[in-house]
Image: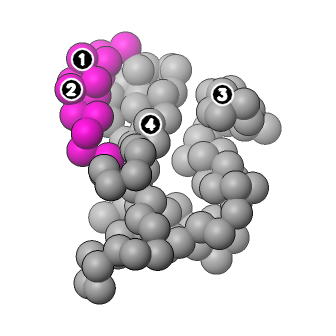
Amino acid sequence: MPYAAVNGQKLYYEDTGEGASVLVFSHGLLMDHTMFAPQAEALKHRYCSIFFRVLCSGSLRGHEISTITRTYRRQSEGFVALDPESRGCAVSGIRSA
């Protein structure tokens, strides 16, 4: 399983596809990264897609994949960490350096 370490947090992610442009997908409450499977399939030849999974503190014991991120700032730093090539992908109003 791939993880990005960001500020002492462990962030699970999956990357698929090819291309110079990167799309980052974030799931909503009570969902996970697999909800974007149709989009990943449709976009895989045009974009590199990154899906990350964040579970809240109420996650079931033994089912934690990512550690809990306490602040929005740390969450947004996680997005940037998933763009190691600094491709300029805008996520939630934040641009990678």
Q: Earlier in the sequence, mark 3 or mark 1?
A: 1
User: Distance between the Cα atoms at labels 3 and 1?
Assistant: 20 Å
Give the structural element (helix, strand or loop) at label 1.
Answer: helix
Mark 3 residue type = Ala
Chain-order first, disc 4 or disc 3: 4
51 vs 47: above or below: below
Q: In which quarter of the image is the N terminus?
A: bottom left
Q: Can residue 87 be seen in this view?
A: no
Question: Which numbered disc, 2 or 1, marks the residue closer to the eye?
Answer: 2
Numbered label attached to residue 38: 2
Is 82 situated above or below 3?
above
| Depth order, front residue of 25/22 | 25
Name the residue that disc number 4 marks: 25
Whether label 2 touches label 4, CB < 8 Å:
no
- How many marks the image carries: the answer is 4
For the point 59% across and 41% down, the residue is 83
Q: Label 3 belongs to which residue?
A: 90
Q: Is residue 61 magenta?
A: no
Q: Residue 42 — which label?
A: 1
Q: Are marks 2 and 1 in contact (CB under 8 Å)?
A: yes
